């Protein structure tokens, strides 16, 4: 079991940057799959980026080249650096960890104004 707490969301203008963090309640060294989803009201949660313990990374097509996912095992923290933000990136961002079942954080709101 692992508890996840996101932070770092907020309001930013188009073209700006934000970094959201996901702090885990225990070591993430052995957690193979972690990542970020986002959700807007009325739509399904969609995968933004994922990262494995071996460093394998995947991005959604519409964030590739703008977002960077990383993990710091020493700090038990997952990050998502978001650059060149667009209004369509506005959503609640959730981190997850697959520990045999999927654990979710509570989410952090990211709002990009036009």
Image: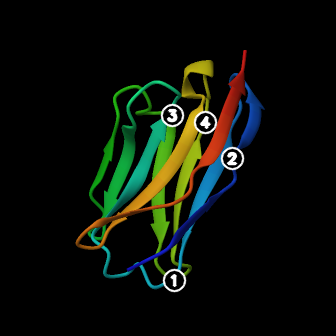
Q: Residue at x 76, y 35 (%)?
A: 11
The disc at residue 66 is 3
Label 4's element? Answer: loop
Q: What residue is shown with label 4?
A: 83
Q: Quadrant of the C terminus?
A: top right
Q: CA distance from mark 3 to mark 4?
A: 5 Å
Q: CB atoms at circles 3 and 4 under 8 Å apart?
A: yes
Query: Badge 1 is on which residue?
Result: 74
Residue on which disc 2 sits: 9
Rendered residue at 31%/81% (across/down): 30
Q: Is residue 104 left or right of residue 56?
A: right
Left or right relative to 32: residue 109: right
Q: x, y percentage for residue 80?
A: 53, 51
Q: CA distance from mark 3 to mark 1?
A: 25 Å
Nearest to viewer (mark 1 / mark 2): 2
- Kindly state the secondary structure of the residue where label 2 is placed: loop
Q: Compute the Cα span from label 4 to label 1.
A: 25 Å
Query: In the image, which disc is placed on residue 51?
Result: none
Mark 2 or mark 3: which comes first in sequence? 2
Q: Quick one: label 4 or label 1, which is nearer the N terminus? A: 1
């Amino acid at each position: 079991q692992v508890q996840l707490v996101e932070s770092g969301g907020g309001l930013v203008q188009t073209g700006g940057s934000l970094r959201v963090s996901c702090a885990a309640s225990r070591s993430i060294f052995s957690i193979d799959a972690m990542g970020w989803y986002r959700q807007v009201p009325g739509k399904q949660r969609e995968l933004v980026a994922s990262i494995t313990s071996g460093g394998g990374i995947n991005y959604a097509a519409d964030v590739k080249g703008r977002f960077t996912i990383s993990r710091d095992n020493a700090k038990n923290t997952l990050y998502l650096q978001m650059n060149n933000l667009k209004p369509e990136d506005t959503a609640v961002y959730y981190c997850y960890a697959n520990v045999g079942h999927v654990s979710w954080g509570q989410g952090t709101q990211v709002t990009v104004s036009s």
